[in-house]
Image (cartoon, grey):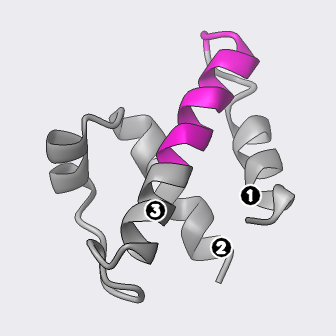
Amino acid sequence: MDTSATDQISSETSSNNAPAGAQASVQVQALLRLRELILAGELPGGARIAELAIVETRFINPISCSAAVLTLALCK
């Protein structure tokens, strides 16, 4: 994974109430989890991602999930 994705998440979370490092860490974990699901074939590459289903079944924070999906989309 390129570091620009991680940098983008960090910059997007700087305005949150949580400490930037803690929030970025959660979003990076969500990003890595989604990436693993795609690489394992559990989420087909190029397919639409149903964020709500991922949030409910994978116990990922909705904001972190949205940020991770956006980052993955930008990393094409």
Q: Is residue 28 visible?
A: yes
What residue is shown with label 1? 5
**Circle 2 or circle 3, nearest the eye:** 3
What residue is shown with label 3? 36
Mark 2: few/some/many CA within 10 Å (<14, 14-19, 20+) = few
> Residue at the location (45% across, 75% down)?
39
| Closer to us: 58 or 19 | 58
> Residue at the location (75% across, 26% down)?
14
Question: Mark 1 touching mark 2, by CB under 8 A?
Answer: yes
What residue is shown with label 2? 74
**Circle 3 or circle 1, nearest the eye:** 3
How many discs mark residues in the rendered view? 3
Mark 3: few/some/many CA within 10 Å (<14, 14-19, 20+) = few
Viewed as shown, does residue 42 lie left or right of 63?
left
In terms of image quadrants, where is residue 53? bottom left
In terms of image quadrants, where is residue 70? bottom right
What amino acid does circle 1 point to? Ala
Span shown in magenta: 17-31
Q: At which x and y percent is residue 9?
A: 70, 44
| Closer to us: 36 or 45 | 36
Question: Which residue appears farthest toward the bottom when viewing the image?
Answer: 46
Q: At which x and y percent is residue 10?
A: 76, 37
Mark 1: few/some/many CA within 10 Å (<14, 14-19, 20+) = some
What amino acid does circle 2 point to? Leu
Q: Secondary structure at mark 2?
A: helix
What amino acid does circle 3 point to? Glu
Q: At which x and y percent is residue 62?
A: 34, 38
Q: Is residue 67 visible?
A: no
Q: Secondary structure at mark 1?
A: helix
| Closer to us: 40 or 56 | 40
* Predominant SS of the magenta segment: helix
